[in-house]
């Protein structure tokens, strides 16, 4: 004969395991207990050794089971209320999401709008800029006017001519090394002329002091030297100094300038 | 024991299996009277193989197994029956308070929006 304590709570024995999620379900535990007690009772009866204690236990378990089953309408009511609350919570959460989305959109719209201080600052800046006249505007206007106007009559073109430039003239730059070489050649010839003239003066002074006998020879020698000095310029290249030939060249250059107007050596309209 | 009808399908299934004379119950007998009758038959003719208590209680054990498997398979039923009605009552009150708090927040927000519109 088994004791009543040994099979009083078989469901609770199972419920001791943490992994079993059914341990908290009272109806399930009562069913398990009833099933186990019934099995033991059937086994005892089939062995012709019925245990009356098992019948009493079975009756108690049956009472507990039906007492738990009586709570089913309560559970049904609780389930209905819980579903209604869940539905309300769901609606409320959806409403919250919609409100938050709307507030976010409104916030972004407000952030997109300019602030009052910024608007006033920009307005002041624009007004200050309107008071100024930019060089671009002036130049555009001048270019528009330049198409229909001429150089003022009081403007002296010579003041902006190539002669006043610090850089060499266009024709000099075009001539390049030839022009430099010719300039050097002219400088050399000028130096030789100066030396020759100084020597001649010194020789004349010495000859006046010397005897008259040697004057004829000296004169002959001077004639030969003068002949040599006269012959040297003939062999020289034409210089670019401001002599007559230079003046002639200058005149020819002026003529060339008049001819080379299309070369855009200097465009006074650009200034 | 008969109830007017349960809206929860799982609870209705349990009721139909275990509670006699329920609306959807195909079982019309309680366990103890059925066992008493089976024991009476065994006592009256103990040598008859047809009057075995094992055979007589097989329908009861079948109903119990069906109910157990139903509870074990239905997660919704397990969640509902895992708390006592008192525990459920406190939990529902807490949910009601949470809902009331959310509605208060809505009411405050609505009042603030109206104040801004008034300005």
Image (spheres, coloured by chain):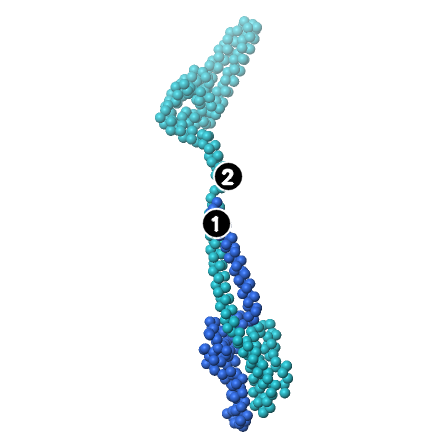
Chain colours: A cyan, B blue
The subunit carrying tag 1 is B
Which corner quadrant holds the C terminus of chain A?
top left
Q: Which residue is mark 2?
A: A117
Residue at 57% over, 68% down: B87
Secondary structure beneath dot 1 equals helix
Q: Nearer the viewer, residue A90 or A71?
A: A71
Q: Tell me the mark number nearer the camera, choosing from 2 and 1.
A: 1
Q: Nearer the viewer, residue B84 or A205?
A: B84
Residue at 51% over, 53% down: B108
Callout 2 and callout 1 share a chain: no
Q: Which residue is mark 1?
A: B114
The subunit carrying tag 2 is A
Mark 2 neighbour density, 10 Å: few (under 14) some (14–19) many (20 or more): few
- Whether residue A36 is visible: no
Counting from the top left corner in percent of width and height, residue B37 is at 52, 88
Mark 1 neighbour density, 10 Å: few (under 14) some (14–19) many (20 or more): few
Which corner quadrant holds the N terminus of chain A?
bottom right
Give the numbered dot on residue A244: none
Residue at 58% over, 85% down: A55
């Amino acid at each position: 004969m088994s004791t009543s304590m040994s099979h009083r709570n078989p469901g609770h024995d199972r419920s001791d395991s943490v992994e079993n999620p059914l341990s908290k379900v009272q109806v399930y535990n009562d069913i398990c207990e009833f099933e186990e007690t019934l099995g033991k009772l059937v086994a005892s009866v089939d062995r012709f050794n019925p245990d009356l204690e098992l019948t009493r236990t079975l009756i108690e378990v049956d009472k507990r089971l039906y007492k738990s089953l009586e709570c089913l309408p309560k559970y049904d009511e609780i389930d209905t209320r819980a579903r209604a609350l869940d539905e309300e919570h769901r609606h409320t959460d959806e409403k919250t999401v919609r409100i938050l989305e709307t507030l976010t959109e409104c916030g972004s719209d407000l952030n997109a709008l300019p602030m009052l201080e910024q608007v006033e600052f920009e307005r002041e800046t624009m007004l200050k800029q309107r008071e100024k006249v930019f060089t671009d505007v002036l130049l555009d206007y001048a270019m528009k006017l330049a198409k229909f106007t001429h150089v003022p009559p009081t403007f002296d073109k010579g003041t902006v001519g190539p002669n006043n430039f610090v850089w060499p003239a266009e024709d000099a730059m075009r001539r390049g090394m030839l022009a430099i070489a010719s300039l050097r050649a002219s400088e050399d010839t000028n130096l030789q002329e100066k030396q020759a003239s100084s020597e001649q003066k010194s020789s004349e002074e010495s000859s006046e002091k010397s005897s008259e006998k040697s004057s004829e020879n000296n004169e002959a020698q001077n004639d030969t030297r003068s002949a040599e000095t006269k012959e040297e310029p003939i062999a020289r290249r034409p210089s670019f100094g401001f002599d007559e030939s230079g003046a002639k060249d200058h005149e020819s250059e002026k003529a060339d300038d008049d001819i080379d107007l299309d070369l855009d050596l200097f465009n006074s309209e650009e200034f | 024991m008969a109830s007017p009808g349960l809206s929860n399908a799982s609870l209705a299934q349990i009721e139909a299996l275990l509670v006699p004379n329920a609306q959807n119950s195909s079982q019309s007998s309680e366990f103890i009277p059925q066992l008493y009758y089976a024991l009476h038959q065994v006592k009256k003719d103990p040598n008859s193989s047809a009057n075995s208590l094992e055979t007589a209680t097989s329908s009861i054990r079948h109903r119990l197994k069906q109910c157990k498997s139903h509870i074990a398979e239905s997660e919704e039923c397990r969640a509902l029956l895992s708390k006592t009605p008192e525990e459920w009552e406190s939990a529902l009150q807490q949910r009601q308070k949470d809902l009331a708090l959310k509605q208060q927040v809505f009411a405050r927000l609505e009042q603030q929006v109206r104040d801004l519109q008034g300005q």
